[in-house]
Structures are given as structure tokens and as C-alpha cells.
Image (spheres, grey):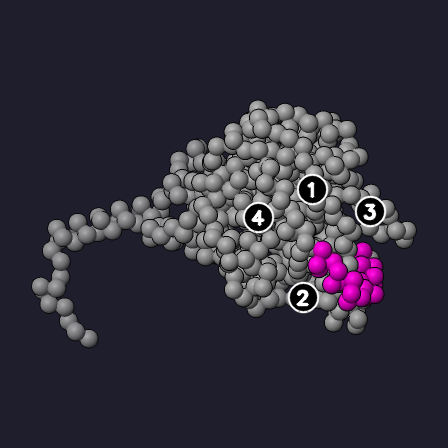
Amino acid sequence: MRQRAASDLPSRRAFVKSAAAAAVVVASEHLLFAQPRAARPSADELARMTLRQASEALRSRRVSSLELTEACLARIDAHQASLNAFITVTADRARARARAMDDELRAGTSRGPLHGVPISLKDNIDTAGVRTTGASALFADRVPSEDAEVVKKLLAAGVVVLGKTNLDEFAAGGSTTTTYYGPAHNPWRLDRSTGGSSGGSAAAVAAQLCYGSIGTDTGGSVRIPSSCCGIVGLKPTYGRVSNRGVIPFIPTRDHVGPLGRTVEDVALLLQAIAGYDAADVTSEDAPVPDFIAGMQAPVGGFRLGIVRTHFFDKLDPEVAAAVEAAIGVLRRLAPNVREVELPAQNAIPNLGMAETYAYHAPWFTRTPSLYQTTMRRRLEAAAKISAADYHHDLQETARLRRAIREVFHDVDLLITPTLKIPARTIADAIARAESEKPLPPEPGNTAPFNVFGLPTITVPCGFTKLGLPIGLQISGPHFQEGRVLALARAYAQATPWHDRHPDPPRAR
């Protein structure tokens, strides 16, 4: 071994100076996120922040990703037993990821506003090395080898994934009660449904178990639970976000979209996941604008169209009152308001059922008993659909997606209630799902916008006397998410509803 010459050794003064400098670096790294013990926020206070607030706290070094992650995990420990929002919690992976994101920040690297922020993913979105079940016994042990495209984008943006959230089996429901893992519970009232199918995601965001979530929406599955749980949920334009790596339900209507506590939060999530995916045949090669900038656009010149036919029929009185009050606020924000009609949607159920069956046939024909009652009946009926019926519905969907463009010659945005009724009781939802008698279809306010493929958001617009949230739905032209976000943000800023949060009981 080479002996160091005297000239290689530092002088005593240089050594002391160097050691002092190193001590400062070590101390600064140790104290990078530290605050005086008395001033440090509690786990609940940290979890109460919005996604944007958490992002700003991270970038200003007032908190670490690990602290945010531990705060969310503590909330999950406290409330998972009562809410059943998660199917899988990846605590160790989340902590390791948070430490890595903190290391990057210490090194001066930031991946953007989502860097180090803990979120959740609906459990029909593939995650490499973490089971993705679709809330079904069929896939109870399914562990993908590759992340879905949206997960790749989110990880590149620096998020910390806390786990996978509960849903109706294979996203085929609107209550998150038809799940192999037991129903999710609404954090506002535990006896009520969260809505579905992204009900676990909505419950987790509303109860402050995470700062945001990614769900899927085929007939309202982001917007329904967001409305039921009093948060914001956005279904982007069909093709805006890749579906690759998501267990399909109805590919011609499947959308991936964000859930958050504020409009700004969902805009930040959308910014990360939007974009063309050449490997996904449903993806559209459209430019991705700055959604945060678009969200801040003035709204006074927007022409608003109130769609009353069908969408206001048979409204619960409390829902009707809240929505009319919301329209009053919108008239002050954007005075040019008129009533409009949408292209009539004839019944086109065969397309969806046939596409669902096409995916599940290899398993369903061998092991139908592994499916929940609701899904099993759907697939049994779908097996009888003819190619002619499927082709007819496919053509009708294409016609409607063109026809809806005409409506936007006269208005810029469409306004409707998100749902006609507040959240059902879980018992009622289960009884309806398992009933042997075919129940009359409930005319929904969310599914038409999946057929049209329009960007659509729900924002809280009130509460019932029982304290159940009510949602307002805003829709815009294809690829005009910025316009939708701008009006939603202006409405939220003009009303107090986003400031209310549930207080679910803790596990004992």
C-alpha cells in the first residue's frame, strides 16, 4: 500500500477547517427538514394538507417526504378498519421510496410538484411487484411484472405510492360494495356507500389517508364516488390519458382520472399522467397544455349551458336545492347562461357488455364461481350478445361523439348535477346488487359523458341535512380540460364546501 507523503497530509489548520465544513454539511443535511420539536405539526396536521400544500412544504424544506408518508400511514392505521378504503397497503415500499425522494431533494434534484407526495392507486391499475386484484377473487394473487403507463408517469414525477384502493369488482359498479374485499365505507357516514367504482380512492382522499388518488371512470367511476365523498374528481377527455396497463372494463369508454381535495390538486395529477401513448390504441396524439395555467384563466366570458332534460329529472329535493343554489353562484361568475339540449342517447348497452365479456371469457368459461354475483350475471348476459348488436352500438357511439361537438357552437361548458340522489346506505346498495329480480335502471348523470368522451369534473356544491355531500358536474369540449378546471376552481373559490372535511372514527 502506498504511504502518504508529508505533502499529501493536510495542515492542522486546513484539517480543522475541512472538518468544520463537513460538520456543517452533515448538520445541514440532518436539519434539512427539521423544525423545533414544539413547532412540528402532528401527523393529522400534516395529512390535512392539500396535495399542493404538501408539495410546497416539501419544496421549501419545511417537511420531508418520509414525514408526509408516515403521517398518511398513521392515518391509514387509524381509519382503515372502519373505512376499508385499501386492499393493499405498501408501507415498507412507500417508506423506501420517500427516503429516496428525500435524498434527491437533498442533492438538489426536484422532479416537479409531485416529488415526494404520497398518493394511492385504484386496484385495477397495474403495479410491478405489487398485486393488482381488480377487487376479485379471480386475481387475488395476481402480481404484474410491469407498471401501467400512468404509474410510470407518476413515478417519473416523483410520487410515493401508499397502496392500492378498493373498488367494485373489475370496476363494474357504482357503490364499491360488489367487491371480494368487502365494501368501502363513506367517511361522512359509515353506513353509507362511497359510490363507485373508485370508492376506496375517494374515501382515502376525503379521510386524508393520502393527498390524491388515481381512479378509472367508465360510467362515472371517478365522479360518482368523488361526489358521494365530497371531493373533486375529473374524467379527462377520452384518449387524453393512457389506459395501457389498466384492467379493462369497457375499452371504448374507459378513462383514467385523478381524485383530489381541490381542483388544483387534480390539475397537478392530470399534468403528470396526460400524454400520448403510441402503444395504446385508445390514446389520442393531442398536445398537453399547462393545466395549472389554464385553470387560472378568467371565467366571466364563458357561455354556460344548463342541461335540464334527463339530468334534472327525479332529483332528490336536497340535491335539487343545492344544485340550483350552485347555478346561482355560476350566474354571478359567468352571466351568459342558457338551457341546452344534448344529442339523444339511445340505449347502447350491448357494446359495453360485449367488450367486458371479450376480456373475461377465458376465465369466466372455466371458473365463473370466482366472480361476484353482480359481475357473474353481467357476463352471463353478455355471452349472448351478437356481433351485429355490438357493431350497431359501436357505430352509435362514434356518431354521438361527433354530434356532441355541435352543442359547443353555442356554449363553452355544460352544467348538471353529478348525481340525482345522495349516497345510498351500504345495505341498500348490496340488496340492489344482489337482487334476483331485475331492478329498473336508474337514469344516471355521469355515463352519458363517457359515451360522448368529454372532459367532466365534479366539485362539492352542498350537503344534505344528514351531512352527505352533493356534487355539481361541469363538462367541456374534447381536450378542453383547462376550461373545465377554470370554472370548477372559480366556483370552489366562491363557495365554502371544499373547506369541510369528514371526521371518521379511529380504530380502537
> Which of label 2 and label 1 is nearer to you?
1
Quick check: can you spot residue 93?
A: no
Residue 141, labelled with which disc? 2
User: Mark 4 falls on what kind of element?
Assistant: loop
Q: Position of residue 368 (x, y in %)?
A: 81, 66
Predominant SS along the magenta part: helix
Identify the amino acid type marked 2: Asp
The disc at residue 478 is 4
- What is the crowding at mark 4: few (fewer than 14 residues within 10 Å), some, or many (at least 20)? many
At a point 10% along the width and 67% down the height, the residue shown is 5
Expressed as whole percent of the image width and height from the top left, the position of residue 412 reads 57, 38
The quadrant in which the N terminus is found is bottom left
Quick one: label 2 or label 1, which is nearer the N terminus? 2
Q: Earlier in the sequence, mark 3 or mark 2?
A: 2
Counting residues from the start of the chain, the first of labels 4 and 2 encountered is: 2
Labelled pair 3, 2 in contact (Cβ < 8 Å): no
Image quadrant where residue 409 sits: top right
Which stretch is magenta?
Answer: 374-396
Q: Amino acid at mark 1?
A: Leu
Looking at the rendered structure, which numbered label has been put on residue 290?
Answer: none
Residue 441, numbered label: 3
With 462 as the anchor, is 160 left or right in this view? left
